[in-house]
Image (cartoon, rainbow, N blue to C red):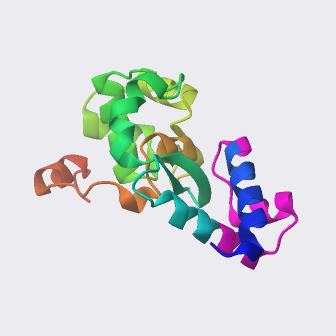
Amino acid sequence: MTKDIEKETALVEAVLYMEGEPQDEGTIARICGLSADTVKAALENLSARYMDSDCGLEISRIGGGVVISVKREYWDNLKERYGKKNEGKISRAAMETLAIIAYSQPITRAEIEKIRGVSADNMMRLLIEKKLIHEIGKKDTPGKPALYGTTKEFLKIFHLGSIADLPKLSEDDIERFELEGE
């Protein structure tokens, strides 16, 4: 790390630590009073520092923002104790509903129910309360049903940079997630 950017790197690190939630580079620059290029260089310095095998932290990009997080290799050992309090355990049915939404978004409640074969009301309410899904618009069909998608909180909990980072589905799973006639 070059001496001329050490203080800026420390400032960016402090902001990421204090914020706790993913912040986009523009917000970090504004909070720190630094240029976008300086923030980018500081983040590169932090990433290089955290890549050291002796460090348990890393810079993660989650939902378009940057956050300091536990390295993935350590998270499995720590998540039971340090996982978010509101994450809690969710039922198999809620996890199935969440997977359908994650892989099929944007999707309506009726489409979810057609895939699952049962009512999704309680599961949807639970996932909304846990801030894992939210309404992202209305479908342009009669009745204008609400469309649902996952949130930044979903990405954060599952350590995903974006929905594109979801594990790939098998052919059997792809067929399960498709609606008849599509």
Residue extending farthest front: 3
Q: Residue at x 25, y 48 (%)?
A: 177
Q: Is residue 38 above or below residue 152?
A: below
**How many dots with numbers?**
0
Q: Is residue 149 above or below residue 41?
A: above
Q: Residue at x 47, y 39 (%)?
A: 157
Residue 124, position in %: x, y?
46, 29
Residue 109, position in %: x, y?
43, 37
Observer-nearest of 48 and 16: 48
Observer-nearest of 151 and 15: 15
Q: Residue at x 73, y 79 (%)?
A: 37
Left or right: residue 139 versus residue 12 is: left
Q: Magenta part of the protein: which range?
A: 18-42
Residue 1, position in %: x, y?
62, 72
Residue extending farthest right: 33
Residue 144 in view of the camera: no
Q: Is residue 171 above or below residue 96?
A: below
Left or right: residue 168 versus residue 40 is: left
Residue 124 in view of the camera: yes
The secondary structure that dominates the magenta segment is helix
Does 154 lie within the magenta span?
Answer: no
Q: Is residue 159 above or below residue 86?
A: below
- Quadrant in the rendering for residue 76: top left
Does 34 lie within the magenta span?
Answer: yes
Residue 164, position in %: x, y?
39, 62
Q: Pick the quarter of the image with the C terminus.
A: bottom left
Residue extending farthest bottom: 37
Q: Residue at x 68, y 45 (%)?
A: 17
Observer-nearest of 170 and 36: 36
